[in-house]
Image: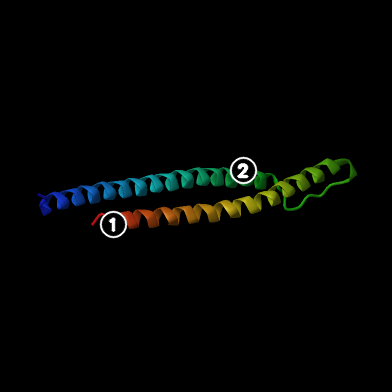
Amino acid sequence: MRDGTNDRTNSTQYRSIREETLELSRSIVLNMLMISWGVITVVLVALVVYRGTLSSKEDDQIFIDAAEQHHYDEQLDVIARMSRLTKPIIALSILSGVLLLASAGVWIYSGLMSF
């Protein structure tokens, strides 16, 4: 004979295991998002600091004669490096913001599901 209590117990155990699995997967996703956000943000900060050091070497105006042409060439090189850094800094800023918002969304969703 089968009674309904055994079916309910199995159903409750299955639901509990499924909920724990979902909670674990949300935790893993949140951890991965936060780790990737941290790595991207560290790279972004390093690029911004590097660009800051380059901009400290840039002069607004330089007055040179023919003998000091190498100073002009150095300034052109600094400006070119700063220009090349603009797109990666913008891309990393956007990616960092998206990862932070995604992490916040997963964290809020996980909190709402635990009620």
| Residue tagged 2 | 50
Density class for disc 2 (Cα within 10 Å; few <14, some 14-19, many ≥20) is: few
* Vertical comparison of 108 with 48: above or below: below
Q: Is residue 79 left or right of residue 24?
A: right
Q: Quadrant of the C terminus?
A: bottom left
**Left or right: 40 with respect to 18?**
right
Along the viewing direction, whichever of 21 and 108 lies nearer the viewer? 21
What residue lies at 24% left-to-right and 48% top-to-bottom? 14
Query: Sequence order check: which comes first, mark 2 or mark 1?
Result: 2
Q: How far across and how far down the image is residue 28, in percent?
A: 38, 44
Instruction: Give the percent coordinates (x, y) of residue 94.
Output: 54, 56
Estimate the x, y position of residue 42 in percent, counting from the top left.
51, 43
Residue closer to the observer: 76 or 93: 93
Q: Residue at x 57, y 42 (%)?
A: 46
User: What's the residue at 62%, 50% (across, down)?
Assistant: 88
Q: Secondary structure at mark 1?
A: helix
Disc 2/disc 1 C-alpha distance (Å) = 43 Å
Amino acid type at circle 2 is Tyr
Q: Which residue is mark 1?
A: 113
